[in-house]
Image: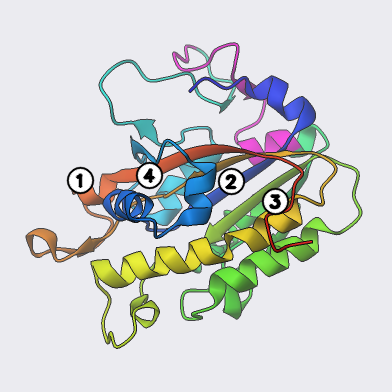
Amino acid sequence: MHRDLPELCRHHDLLLIVLDTLRYDVAVAEWRGGGTPHLARRLPAGWEERHTPGSFTYAAHQAFFAGYLPTPAAPGANPTRLFAARFAGSETTGPGTKVFDAPDLVTGLRQEGWRTVCIGGVGFFNLRNPLGRVLPGLFEEAYWEERFGVTDPESTRHQFEFAAERLAAPDPRPLFLFINLSALHQPNYFYLPGATSDSRESHAAALRYVDSQWPVLEAGLARRPRPTFAIVTSDHGTLYGEGGRHGHRQGHPVVWTVPYGEMLLPLTAPAGHP
């Protein structure tokens, strides 16, 4: 899918949603099985299989903000990137790329007068220590609360409701909203009734929970004066015993393979939301 990002940015807000730790195989299975109807409505062709540039959150997000989103898994030349820092000799920058004279997308948009908002989820966004402030520090507005983190079973609802509140703030500038969703990350056993430990099944249940909250975010976006171009992806997968391995930050196909999707969200609230 080819997008002309410079043209889109003239008329659209930008949204980057990272479903932290979401596995590609789980995302596809839930899409096919009807477990994620709200996301499927916006991704009618399903999730695209891609390879992440990083095997854990910090590395992947540093690459994302520099313009290196997950790369298509299908063989062939790397596609033209959506956005990029100006870099001599880049072979993935073309007419459809929004190029910045800045080290990252967030700084580049701020220099152009955009409002930039980060709503954090996992520990690399918790603002509690220097490391947890590096990525949020790129943004004009950065938010994190305990209820947005991995230990709260209602983290996505809290994050989306908070996002809707921030979207309602009067501000005429175009908006770049970034949300790191923590629900898929361990611990996620509490999304599966009766479970006492994390598993691929509880990971899938967490994704179904995230999908159930999606209309809250769309309703908030629909109140904006501009439609939204959204990128929804995972930063890496995670292992639940495959080959005797658990977690991520490992060189395994389950970790490197991630779901990716792009959406154009119109100024129309989803059913059931004013």
Which badge, 2 or 4, comes first in the chain's sequence?
A: 2
Mark 2 / mark 3, whichever is N-terminal: 2
Task: Identify residue for label 2.
Answer: 16
Rounded to the nearest angstrom, the CA distance separating label 3 from label 4 is 25 Å
Is residue 182 among the parts visible in the rendering?
no
Q: Residue at x 20, y 45 (%)?
A: 253
Tell me the quarter of the image containing the C terminus.
bottom right
Circles 1 and 4, Cβ within 8 Å, touching? The answer is no
SS state under label 1: helix
User: Mark 3 against mark 4, which lies toward the viewer?
Assistant: 4
Instruction: State how far apart marks 1 and 3 are (Cα).
Output: 32 Å
Label 4 belongs to which residue?
259
Asked which quadrant contains residue 78, the reply is top left
Assess whether residue 107 is covered by the magenta stretch: yes
Query: Which residue sits at x=87%, y=59%?
Result: 169
Q: What's the residue at 62%, 56% (across, down)?
A: 136
Nearer the viewer's eye, disc 1 or disc 3?
Answer: 1
**Which residue is labeled 3 in the image?**
139
Label 1 vs label 4, nearer the camera = 4
Give the residue type at disc 3: Phe
Measure the alpha-carbon separation of dots 1 and 4: 13 Å
The kind of residue tagged 1 is Pro
| N-term mark: 1 or 2 | 2
Left or right, 177 with reference to 113: left
Q: Which residues are magenta?
A: 89-109
Residue picked out by circle 1? 253
Residue 63 x/y as whole percent: 46, 40
Looking at the picture, which amino acid does disc 2 mark? Leu
Hey, what amino acid is under mark 4?
Answer: Pro
